[in-house]
Image: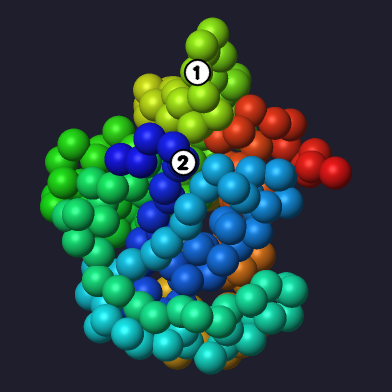
Amino acid sequence: MSTSGVHVLAVCTGNICRSPMMERILRDGFARHGAGDLFSVTSAGTWAQPGEPMQPFAEATLVERGLDPSGFGSQRVTEQAIQSADLVLTATLEHRSVVVGLVPGAVRQTFTLLELARVALAVPPAPVLKDGSRADEVRRAIAWAAQMRGATARSAEDTDDLEDPLGAPQDVYRARAAQITAAVDQVVPFLIGAEPGRESG
């Protein structure tokens, strides 16, 4: 794991639809809260073919939201990538299982994105460290979320999975991006100890 900053890894299947949108929306979320310099965000896929471009509808959806999709190339998730991440956010519970299967010790910092958003909404802020860096505070929040997730039951109507939009029309990509953004708007403040909805000036 990094010591100077916090590395977040977003994971889906092919690394061309969901996780690239997660990556770019997370980057934007951290930047909007004045924490862009603290976090690095990358993405990977459990069955990705390295070097594939982002799916065109995913690209177009990001552009519509004012985000830059350029410079992207897919990559396969590896043990090294997981071990170097402070936080792994997956699209589905199945992806989470694959990550933990590759690196069992990563269970404490691996969540689906929607799961972490649900935990962030339900639990009180993490206890504050007396003598810690900003990155240490974020890692404490991640550990706190792992500790508290068992106390935040998911309702029968809710899901912790982002469904795959591959093969669907662009409106489905727009819906996925909206889900991701809503989750990021809960996750980012939780990680940095800010109030949800209050962005940095």
Determine whether, in the image, residue 63 is placed left or right of residue 114.
right
Identify the image quadrant of the N terminus.
Answer: top left
What colouring method underlies this structural image?
Answer: rainbow
Q: Is residue 184 left or right of residue 201?
A: left
Residue located at (48% from left, 53% from top): 40
Which quarter of the image is occupied by the C terminus? top right
Q: Is residue 40 above or below residue 47?
A: above
Say which residue appears at 55% left-offset and 43% top-offset.
Answer: 38
Most extreme residue toward the front is 4
Most foreground residue, 31 or 17: 31
Residue at mark 2: 5
Type of amino acid under label 2: Gly
Pick the residue in front: 71 or 122.
71
Type of amino acid under label 1: Gly
Q: CA distance from mark 2 to mark 1?
A: 13 Å
Residue 88, position in %: x, y?
Answer: 36, 49
Secondary structure under the numbered disc 1 in the rendered image: loop
Q: Earlier in the sequence, mark 2 or mark 1?
A: 2
Residue at the spot of label 1: 132
